[in-house]
Amino acid sequence: MQTKNGIFIKNIYYMLAYAFEDFKKAEEDLVEVEKFDNALLLFAYILKNGISHQIKQGLLKDYVEVAEELPSFKGKLDIKQTIPLKMRNKNTLVCKYDEFSSNNLLNSILKSTLLMLVKSKKLQGSEGEKLARDLKKVLFYFGGVEEIDLKTVKWNSIVFNSVNARYRLMIAICKLAYEELLLSTDSGENRVNHLFNEKNLHTLYQNFIYKYFEKEWTKTRQDHGNKKLKMEQREIKWDISEEKIPLLPKMIGDIILEYRGHFLIIDAKFYKKETAENQGKESYHSSHFYQIFSYTINKDRVLKKRLSVSQDESLVEGMLLYAKTPDSIIDKEILNSQTICGLRISVEALDLNQDFLEGEKSLKNQLDKIASEFIDRVELKN
């Protein structure tokens, strides 16, 4: 399920599962997810299981307005539609009223996506045919739900809350399936061509890393010497003398880890290449490097002033954490960390082409290594 130009298909599932806090489901599905080498098979499987689970609890219902011709008054009268009936001497009224119904936007998206998958020619082979049959069985429960043209869905305008939170991952998968963002290559392998768009992929990558550390490292880790981290507030204060400066932008770090009063600020970036050419010379993106340096030095100086700590002691580190791509040069560099103004600034790449759980270079081990090495560096100082 991998090519040199792509991401493990199942890792997209894990990223979505962490970002949308559906960890338990991802762990339960691990064995089944492993066997899929076609993106739409994976989407179909996730939706089949997710919707089947939702059906047991009941499909989401909302109050929707219904207009109906009735023999007696109900709700509110639609005068404009009732007058023509009276002119034809009909003893009925057109009334509008709210009905508690499963015929709502989210269920319509699910139904329309299921129909799209069932009709897809990419659900092939024994696994595909079985999934298609299973999806048809699931569709039986959507009898009262209208189809929707997925072209008209304003995905970014969908609002989730405590009532419909269980739909978040399923709707994200529907979007992926509809846009066919995981495409098959000529060799039959699969890669990520455009996941949402670059902006959304960047956001997914950030959220995944944040949620991973929040779930896996804010509790005591017996496999790492009973250590744990804290997630620090993400806003970083400027080191300024004035209380407030008009128009000064806020600094918001993607991930800020804290251990024994020391901090690691991680700025997660998903770009095709972590460097840019400037006057014939390759260098890290200047805006990225200036940003992480500004975050780090301001956080460090404000912290030292508050704690009355010597300026010679550094309390904050900064890290640019790129998603590894075929064009990455980080692996080829001899040194990816530097001490600048007494502060450790590093540039790392997270290889999404590795298995999530298995192997020394698994995605999980890569993230755990970042946390454990940060802890080790702090303990060396104390």
Image (cartoon, rainbow, N blue to C red):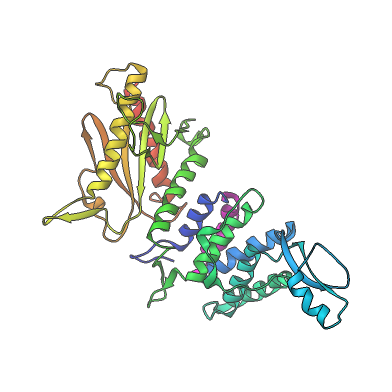
Name the residue: 67% across, 75% down. 136
Q: Residue furthest bottom?
A: 88
Q: Could you say where residue 305 lies in the image, as x and y percent from the top left?
A: 32, 20
Quadrant where the image shows the C terminus: top left
Name the residue: 29% across, 61% down. 326
Q: Residue furthest top?
A: 308
Q: Could you say where residue 84 lies in the image, as x and y percent from the top left?
A: 77, 79
Camera-nearest residue between 89 and 325 = 89
Q: Which stretch is magenta?
A: 23-39
Q: Residue furthest front?
A: 87
Count how many numbered circles sit on residues in the image.
0
The answer to whether 79 is drawn above or below residue 222 in the figure is below
Q: Is residue 90 left or right of residue 24?
A: right
The answer to whether 379 is drawn above or below residue 94 in the figure is above
Name the residue: 44% across, 46% down. 209
Residue 177, magenta (yes or no): no
* Prevailing secondary structure of the magenta residues: helix
Residue 25, magenta (yes or no): yes
Q: Could you say where residue 347 lies in the image, as x and y percent from the top left?
A: 28, 44
- Snapshot quadrant of residue 45: bottom right
Q: Is residue 250 left or right of residue 341?
A: right
Q: Could you say where residue 336 lies in the image, as x and y percent from the top left?
A: 24, 43
The answer to whether 283 is drawn above or below residue 265 in the figure is below
The answer to whether 144 is drawn above or below residue 355 in the figure is below
Q: Is residue 209 left or right of residue 165?
A: left
Name the residue: 48% across, 37% down. 217
- Snapshot quadrant of residue 1: bottom left
- Snapshot quadrant of residue 169: bottom right
